[in-house]
Image (cartoon, grey):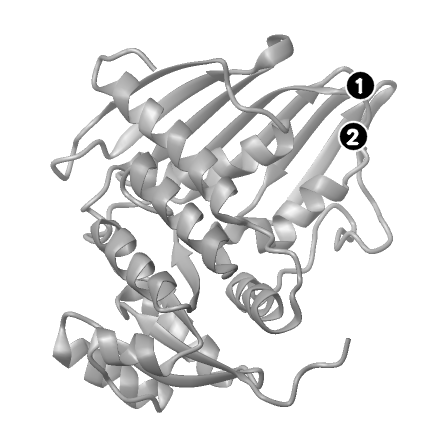
């Protein structure tokens, strides 16, 4: 299908650290007409508006002027902003997590379905070259366990949520996608170090069929770390996302993946691309072309459900 001549009129609600990137990417996309942006900090809105050549606007006026909105405000505002946009008949892209509670997530999903509007959740790792490399690698056999590590030095942002909803939720979404199932049981530990909420967490997920995943996330680490290890009936896959390396150990010995047509893997590595640009392009295609929503409200709800269960387990409850 050829691209429509009329671009998508898009508004950005929240232009903090990540919302600013959304605004700049949207401003450069020929299929998007950035109609404006909104932020509770008027000075921030003016500064990002100058960069993106888009006027700061009142939230209600921006929703009325747009065909679709990106909700990139702090998590506690996700539901109110997304619900207002959906109620006005607009398509919505909401950053992860989809909402603060499952009831809020359910309400957004129901509203989007009733209005036949696109609801996409910002699990950006689904659009990364790294994830494509993982899903395209011929590990063979059946995956039995996943071990994911995501760590970063402390930065004073996103402290309105725990490290589970800040960082670990990325790997929760990826593991749920790879496992194709929801966990049967969850155990977790974690602690607050530099904020009022857990800044590191380790969670163990048990899936049907005896499969398991161990997820580690920290935002008070000494150094950046991004790794995934997959163990299966035919061997092991080890991925280091920071140095873009992937190796597979199969029956018969260690064998780095050399080339897979169309997978982006080249000599045990891959060529990075702009994941946010790819994520925005998928949202635009869903809104303008009727393309399938890659990460829909149901996917966002699944990740949120597991994340909240991990937080409950950390607090000493039963997940």
Q: Viewer-proximal residue, 190 or 247?
A: 190
Q: Residue at x 28, y 54 (%)?
A: 78
Q: Relative to 293, is 1 above or below?
A: below
* Residue assigned mark 2: 139
Q: Viewer-proximal residue, 170 or 225?
A: 170
Residue 226 in view (yes/no)? no
- How far across and how far down the image is residue 230, in percent? 64, 26
- How far across and how far down the image is residue 197, in percent? 17, 34
Residue 198 in view (yes/no)? yes
Q: Is residue 206 left or right of residue 59?
A: right
Query: Where is residue 317, by image quadrant?
Result: top left
Q: Earlier in the sequence, mark 2 or mark 1?
A: 2
Q: Residue at x 87, y 53 (%)?
A: 261
Q: Relative to 171, is 29 above or below?
A: below
Q: Relative to 309, is 82 above or below?
A: below
Q: Residues within 10 Å of mark 1 (few under 14, many from 20)?
A: some
* Residue assigned mark 1: 234
Q: Residue at x 14, y 80 (%)?
A: 43
**Element type at marker 1?**
loop
Q: Is residue 272 left or right of residue 214?
A: right
In this view, which residue lies farthest toward the top? 210
Query: Where is residue 143, by image quadrant?
Result: top right
- How far across and how far down the image is residue 217, in percent? 37, 33
Mark 2–mark 1 Cα distance, whole angstroms, equals 7 Å
In the rendered view of the protein, which quadrant contains the N terminus?
A: bottom right
What numbered label is drawn on residue 107?
Answer: none
């Amino acid at each position: 299908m050829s691209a429509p001549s009329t671009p998508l009129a898009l508004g950005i609600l929240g232009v903090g650290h990540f919302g600013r990137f959304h605004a700049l990417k949207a401003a450069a996309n020929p299929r998007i007409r950035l109609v404006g942006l909104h932020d509770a900090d008027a000075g921030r809105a003016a500064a990002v508006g100058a960069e993106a050549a888009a006027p700061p606007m009142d939230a209600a006026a921006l929703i009325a002027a747009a065909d679709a909105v990106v909700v990139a405000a702090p998590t506690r505002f996700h539901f109110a902003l997304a619900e207002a946009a959906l109620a006005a008949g607009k398509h919505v892209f909401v950053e992860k997590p989809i909402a603060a509670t499952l009831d809020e997530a359910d309400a957004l999903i129901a509203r989007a379905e009733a209005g036949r509007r696109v609801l996409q959740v910002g699990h950006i790792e689904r659009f990364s070259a790294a994830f494509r490399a993982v899903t395209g690698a011929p590990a063979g056999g059946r995956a039995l366990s996943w071990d994911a590590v995501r760590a970063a030095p402390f930065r004073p942002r996103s402290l309105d949520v725990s490290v589970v909803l800040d960082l670990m939720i990325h790997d929760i979404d990826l593991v749920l996608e790879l496992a194709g199932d929801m966990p049967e049981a969850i155990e977790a530990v974690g602690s607050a170090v530099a904020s009022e909420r857990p800044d590191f967490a380790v969670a163990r997920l048990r899936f049907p069929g005896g499969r398991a995943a161990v997820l580690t996330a920290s935002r008070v680490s000494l150094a950046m770390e991004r790794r995934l290890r997959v163990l299966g009936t035919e061997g092991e896959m080890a991925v280091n996302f920071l140095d873009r390396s992937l190796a597979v150990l199969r029956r018969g010995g260690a064998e780095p993946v050399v080339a897979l047509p169309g997978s982006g893997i080249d000599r045990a590595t891959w060529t990075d691309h702009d994941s946010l640009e790819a994520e925005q392009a998928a949202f635009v295609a869903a809104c303008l072309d009727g393309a399938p929503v890659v990460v829909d409200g149901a996917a966002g709800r699944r990740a949120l459900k597991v994340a909240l269960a991990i937080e409950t387990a950390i607090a000493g409850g039963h997940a």
